[in-house]
Amino acid sequence: QVQLVESGGGLVQPGGSLRLSCAASRITFRINSMGWYRQLPGKGRELVARIFSAGSTNYADSVKGRFTISRDNANNMVYLQMNSLKPEDTAVYYCHLLHNWQEYWGQGTQVTVSS
């Protein structure tokens, strides 16, 4: 069974930066995409950023220019560099994997942006 383990969440002041990491294990087929979603308090889960097997990416409009997704193919890892963080970025961030066209989710990591 594929497993995803996230790290890097925490408390940061507005304007600060955080880097999230996600490691995928027990990968047996092609990874179609890896990405990050977030769930704000009282709201549904939304796409933050995604990177596809060919390297293309897409981002939510609210994070363009501030967040950068990257991937280490050799180690099946995905990263989310978050800069210029705002209080409205406060959420639980989930790693997402599309593997052999099946979806997998990490356990979530809390990001809190507050002074």
Image (cartoon, helix red, strand yellow):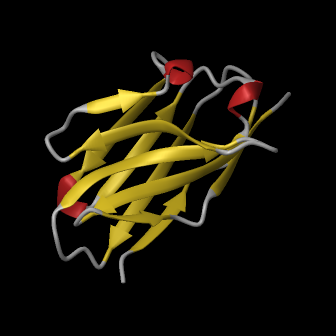
> Which residue is found at the position 35% from the left and 67% from the top?
24
> Which residue is found at the position 59% from the left and 66% from the top?
107
Q: Residue furthest right?
A: 115
Residue 30: give x, y in percent of width and height.
16, 63
> Which residue is found at the position 74% from the left and 42% from the top?
43
Q: 60 above or below 94?
A: above
Q: Is residue 11 left or right of residue 76?
A: right
- Seen from the viewer's position, the closer of residues 21 and 43 is 43
Q: Tell me the quarter of the picture where residue 4 sits.
A: bottom left
Please say whether residue 8 is visible from this viewpoint: no
Residue 28: give x, y in percent of width and height.
19, 77
Residue 113: give x, y in percent of width and height.
75, 33
- Seen from the viewer's position, the closer of residues 50 and 45 is 45
Q: 51 above or below 109?
A: above
Please say whether residue 56 is visible from this viewpoint: yes
Q: Tell me the quarter of the picture where residue 27 sits.
A: bottom left
Q: Tell me the quarter of the picture where residue 77 sits.
A: bottom left
Q: 54 above or below 113?
A: below
Residue 95: give x, y in percent of width and height.
48, 55
